[in-house]
């Protein structure tokens, strides 16, 4: 396993921990903390994907979004992933966490789907393992 692959695996593991924490907070009725954890899991999984695809770790969520856009520009098969990322940012982070404005059913769905988002990022990272062009 290369250093990039090991670092991506570490970041994916962190994303999975955050997704678990999001589910626990949601079960406890702490919606905003659950949204924050789910958003963090989303960012971490995307950071790991960016690292796997480029060999460079983004470091900041704004940089993660920009690098994801650059990856999508080079590979439009990732378009849906970018749309899901943007939706999660708008709903979990901006609406729920920052403004305390949300539809509970939507937040619950997004939190349940966080694991799916992480798994998709992992799958896409494996497809390009070792290719950092």
Image: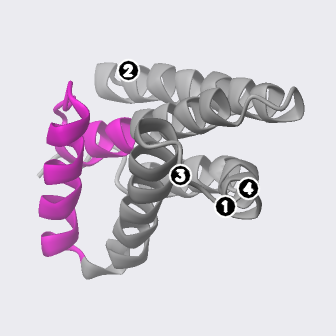
Residue 94: within the magenta? Answer: no
Give coordinates of residue 93: x percent, y percent.
Answer: 43, 43
Q: Kindly identify which residue carries mark 2.
A: 7
Q: Which sits earlier in the primary sequence, circle 4 or circle 2?
A: 2
Give coordinates of residue 68: x percent, y percent.
Answer: 23, 55
Residue at disc 3, secondary structure: loop
Number of numbered callouts drawn = 4
Q: Is residue 58 above or below residue 71?
A: above
Q: Residue furthest right?
A: 27
On-image quarter of the N terminus: top left
Do tag 4 and tag 1 residues touch (Cβ < 8 Å)? yes
Q: Kindly identify which residue carries mark 4.
A: 104
Left or right side of 19 for 100: left
Marks 2 and 3: which is nearer the front?
3
Residue at disc 4, secondary structure: helix
Measure the alpha-carbon separation of dots 2 and 3.
35 Å
Measure the alpha-carbon separation of dots 3 and 1.
7 Å
Q: Kindly identify which residue carries mark 3.
A: 101
Marks 3 and 4: which is nearer the front?
3
Q: Residue 121: which disc?
A: none
Q: Kindly identify which residue carries mark 1.
A: 103
Check disc 4: other Cα within 10 Å, few if <14, some if 14-19, many if 20+: few
116 or 90: nearer the eye?
90
Snapshot quadrant of residue 127? bottom left
Q: Which residues are magenta?
A: 46-75
Can residue 122 be seen here?
yes
Marks 1 and 2: which is nearer the front?
1
Check disc 3: other Cα within 10 Å, few if <14, some if 14-19, many if 20+: few
Dominant SS of magenta comes to helix
Q: Which sits earlier in the primary sequence, circle 2 or circle 3?
A: 2
Taking the spot 22% from the left edge, 69% from the top edge, the residue there is 72
Measure the alpha-carbon separation of dots 1 and 2.
36 Å
């Amino acid at each position: 396993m290369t250093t990039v692959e090991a670092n991506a695996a570490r970041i994916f593991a962190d994303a999975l921990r955050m997704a678990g924490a999001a589910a626990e907070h949601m079960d406890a009725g702490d919606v905003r903390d659950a949204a924050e954890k789910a958003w963090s899991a989303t960012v971490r999984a995307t950071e790991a994907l960016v690292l796997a695809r480029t060999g460079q770790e983004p470091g900041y969520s704004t940089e993660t979004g920009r690098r994801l856009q650059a990856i999508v520009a080079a590979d439009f098969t990732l378009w849906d992933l970018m749309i899901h990322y943007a939706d999660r940012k708008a709903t979990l982070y901006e609406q729920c966490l920052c403004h305390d404005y949300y539809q509970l059913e939507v937040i619950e769905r997004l939190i349940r789907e966080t694991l799916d988002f992480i798994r998709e990022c992992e799958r896409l990272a494996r497809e390009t393992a070792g290719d950092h062009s």
